[in-house]
Image (cartoon, rainbow, N blue to C red):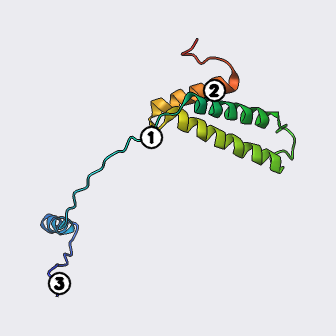
Amino acid sequence: MSDRKVVCISPNSLATQAELLDSMFDEIAEVSVTVKRDVPPPTAEEMANAVREFAQSWKEFVALDSSRSNAPIENKWWQHLQWLALADSALKDIFCGRDRSPVSIAKYHAYRLKLVCGRPSKADA
């Protein structure tokens, strides 16, 4: 037989709740986490390629006349939307790296709006 005991508790019994908690954590494992920083930073050429691909995808997507009633149904519209999403993701990965903090994402969005709209953000003015 096993030497583990089954503890049935009632909601009002604090002593048996403590026993249950003690029995739940009989085995405590120690975990160690290390972060490898062997990913090289992106080169200027990679950044330029990502910006170029994003800008081209944006222009092609906007060039489609989405005001037509059947534009979203057409396969070409969806393809351009997918290419835009992929280019956006690649640019975000290069711009932010592993830092996904709200501040980093906000800086990326301001940069992306500057690319798309061609006008500086409030911080640049």
Earlier in the chain: of badge 3 and badge 1, it is: 3
Q: Kindly indicate whether the residue at mark 1 contacts the one at mark 2 (C-beta within 8 angstroms).
A: no
How far apart are labels 3 and 1 at the CA level? 49 Å
Residue lying at 44% horizontally and 35% vertically, measured from the top left:
101
Mark 3, secondary structure of its residue: loop
Question: Tag 3 or tag 2, which sits nearer the N-term?
Answer: 3
Mark 3 residue type = Ser
Q: Amino acid at mark 2?
A: Leu
Tell me the crowding category of disc 2: few under 14, some 14 to 19, or many 20 or more residues within 10 angstroms, Cα based.
some
User: Which residue corresponds to mark 2?
Assistant: 113
Rendering coords of residue 90 (x, y %): 60, 40
Q: Residue at x 35, y 45 (%)?
A: 35
Secondary structure beneath label 2: helix
Q: Which residue is mark 3?
A: 2
In the picture as drawn, the residue positioned furthest to the bottom comes out as: 1
Q: What kind of residue is marked 1?
A: Val
Place residue 109 in its image quadrant.
top right
53 to 118, vertically: above or below:
below
Which residue is identified by label 1?
Answer: 39
Most foreground residue, 69 or 15: 69
Instruction: Between residue 1 and residue 82, name the one nearer to us.
Output: 82
Query: What is the CA distance from the residue labelled 2 to the residue labelled 3?
Result: 64 Å
- How far separated are the C-alphas under marks 2 and 1? 27 Å
Residue 29 lies left or right of residue 80; in this view the side is left
Residue 75 against residue 37 in the figure, above or below: below
Residue 73 seen in this snapshot: no
Quarter of the picture containing the C terminus is top right
Q: Secondary structure at mark 1?
A: loop
The spot of residue 42 in percent (x, y) is: 52, 33
